Image (spheres, rainbow, N blue to C red):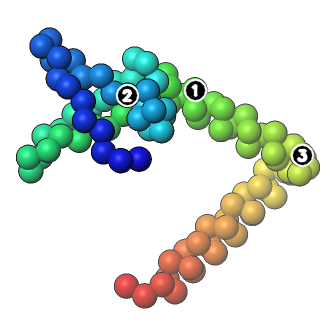
Amino acid sequence: MPPVVVRLQPNGHLILPRELRKRAGVADGTKLEVVWKDGSFSMTPQSTRNEALDGFGKALAELRQEAKEKGLDKLSKREINSAVAAVRRDMREERERRPL
């Protein structure tokens, strides 16, 4: 998307075009952190605690459904812990193989 020029209103408000908000995934009421650095502004959306928890809850529900579809909800705690340990071991070995 090409750069967008917006006008600062007399009361200090900025209006971000709908297409820009849509592409950025910024909904009405979203708080933005605004930083002035090296002669320019940058804005970063800030999620609230409730939004973060809602997102976590949705992700957890999706993972549970996926596990159920794969039959993983029938694993014992010992089997789960063993699988987690194996993945952690593989990830650690992969990190150790990477050059610095």
> In the shown orientation, is residue 68 left or right of residue 84?
right
Which of the two residues, 18 or 55, is positioned nearer the viewer here?
A: 18
Quadrant of the image occupied by residue 14: top left
Q: Residue at x 72, y 57 (%)?
A: 81
Q: Does dot 2 land on a helix, a strand or a loop?
A: loop
Amino acid found under the numbered disc labelled 1: Asp
Q: Residue 75: x percent and y percent?
A: 86, 51
Q: Is residue 48 visible?
A: no
Quadrant of the image occupied by residue 68: top right
Q: Spatial distance from mark 1 to mark 3, Cα to Cα?
A: 23 Å
Q: Does dot 1 land on a helix, a strand or a loop?
A: helix
Amino acid found under the numbered disc labelled 2: Pro
Q: Pointer 2 and pointer 3: residues touching (CB < 8 Å)?
A: no
Q: Residue at x 46, y 24 (%)?
A: 27
Q: Residue 22: x percent and y percent?
A: 48, 32
Q: Is residue 30 visible?
A: yes
Q: Return the mark for residue 69.
A: 3
Above or below 13: residue 78: below
> In the shown orientation, is residue 67 left or right of residue 84?
right
Q: Which residue is mark 1?
A: 54
Amino acid found under the numbered disc labelled 3: Glu
Image quarter in which the C terminus is found: bottom left
Q: Spatial distance from mark 1 to mark 2, Cα to Cα?
A: 27 Å
| First in sequence: mark 1 vs mark 2 | 2
Quadrant of the image occupied by residue 13: top left
Above or below 100: residue 38: above
Q: Does dot 3 land on a helix, a strand or a loop?
A: helix
Q: Residue at x 41, y 35 (%)?
A: 20
Q: Which residue is mark 2?
A: 17
